[in-house]
Amino acid sequence: MPDSPETVAPERDLFSKFDALIAEREALLATGVRDPFAIVMDKVTSPTQAVIRGKDTILLGTYNYMGMTFDPDVVAAGKKALDEFGSGTTGSRVLNGTYDPHKDCEAALREFYGTEHAMVFSTGYQANLGIISTLAGKGEYIILDADSHASIYDGCSLGNAEIVRFRHNSVEDLDRRLGRLPKEPGKLVVLEGVYSMLGDIAPLPEMVAVAKKHGAMVLVDEAHGMGFFGPNGRGVYEEQGVEKDVDFVVGTFSKSVGTVGGFCVSNHPKFDVMRLVCRPYVFTASLPPSVVATAATSIRKLMHAGDKRAHLWRNSKRLHGGLKDLGFKLGTETPQSAIIAVILEDQQQAVLMWQALLEGGLYVNMARPPATPAGTFLLRCSLCAEHSAEQVETILGMFEAAGKAVGVIA
Ligand code: PMP
């Protein structure tokens, strides 16, 4: 294998298309800032605490909303399954890769969601990829919010349906675009409970009513709503009372559940045929039994986590109110979820602020286009039910110090 592509003309070097990105990144790092996309956790000591480059750091940039990653029952279930079933399945769910823990995990999901069917995928990304590309086929339509997650867009690209986008959270635009489509073909409207960049939630009752009026089926991605919203923690669609009208819920184990994996639940009587026709389910190895065992235990505990949900809401309200009072520009007027986005002017300011926070002992997510809407650079704060009230006050102090040092606030 050659060390460099000397034998390939520069115009045929397949990496040439990334030159602008490489140059932009090099210019940024040349200013002396740390690379926000190359952080290493030396140690993680709790859902809210880590050691990064030898420094004790509060974590405010994880998806660990319910703080389940160190739950003793969850950890014990994983260890037990590791001992009983080994490290991996080495096979697809439809061949040798379905073990008792996979079936138990699907049973836990059916209990949690109160549905007839549940199907576990290897990640949430693959769940969207598989369900969306398989449900809507040639001649059918997928209608999705313009700010949809990459996995929803990629599900559209993988399939053969016609794709129609509507303006973010606009009920009118959804109605108008559905109204222009031919009546006969099948249609799937894809929504998210919580949109993960700004932390805003969807007006699901209005959206779902419009979808039903036009005869479309509805899929809601509850990746960031599971565990936290609704009396049973099912998600925004439960909190907003539209459970009866949502045909499919997609979710992930990588956030509130605290492990890795994805799923789709439904009451459709023919749902199980998906196991035979959904390529991202069939043509990949199943999750290690230890992983699904931790997920099943976590999911069953999340059903009874009302106190944690209440504490997480208190944290979210306090952080949102505190940051607003300090003068930061936020992604939403009021706290809507466990995600609070701090909007910065440009990449330079965002990276400087991110670095000042890190040096002060706080880790948040740096987000930039194309992941963010409308070309914004933002710092995404995601709260955890295990953040103590004192930690939230400490976090506010860190934001005040960093914001003044960088000149984001006066
Ligand atoms: N849907 C949404 C809305 C997400 O934000 C994410 C992950 N950030 C996923 C799906 C994919 O989840 P996973 O990490 O399990 O692949």
Image (spheres, rainbow, N blue to C red):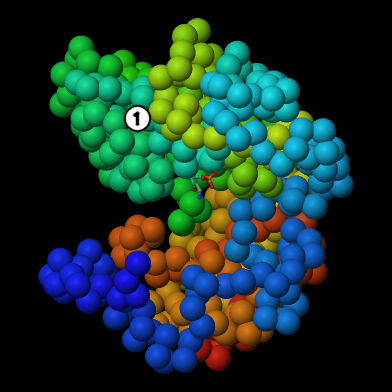
Q: Position of residue 32 (x, y in %)?
A: 47, 91
Residue 382 makes an appearance in the image? yes
Name the residue: 41% across, 19% down: 277
Residue pushed farthest top?
269
Viewer-closest of 11 and 208? 11
Count of labels in the image: 1
Q: With 139 as the anchor, is 97 left or right in this view? A: right
The residue that mark 1 highlights is 133
Left or right, 51 with reference to 235: right
Q: Quadrant of residue 181?
A: top left
Query: What residue lies at 49% left-to-right and 78% top-to-bottom?
Result: 35
Q: Whole-percent x and y of residue 287?
A: 62, 37
Left or right: 348 as drawn, with respect to 360: left
Classify mark 1: residues with Cα within 10 Å, few (<14), some (14-19) or many (20+): many
Which residue is at 38% across, 48% downward?
150
Mark 1: amino acid: Ser
Instruction: Please tell me whether mark 1 sits on a helix, a strand or a loop.
Output: helix
Q: Quadrant of the N terminus?
A: bottom left
Residue 307 visible (yes or no): no
Q: Locate residue 14 relative to residue 54 in the image: left or right.
A: left
What residue appears at the point 61 percent right and 24 percent down from the top-left corner? 96
- Furthest residue toward front: 1
Residue 253 vs residue 290, the one in the foreground: 290
In the image, residue 408 sits, relative to residue 292, either above or below, namely: below
Front-most of residues 9 and 200: 9
Mark 1 Cβ inside 8 Å of ligand 1: no
Q: Position of residue 30 (x, y in %)?
A: 40, 90
Q: Is 270 drawn above or below residue 166 in the view shown?
A: above
**Residue 300, above or below 139:** below
Identify whether 322 is placed above or below 170. Answer: below
Tell me where residue 162 appears, x and y as whole percent: 21, 30
Quarter of the image for residue 344 reads bottom left
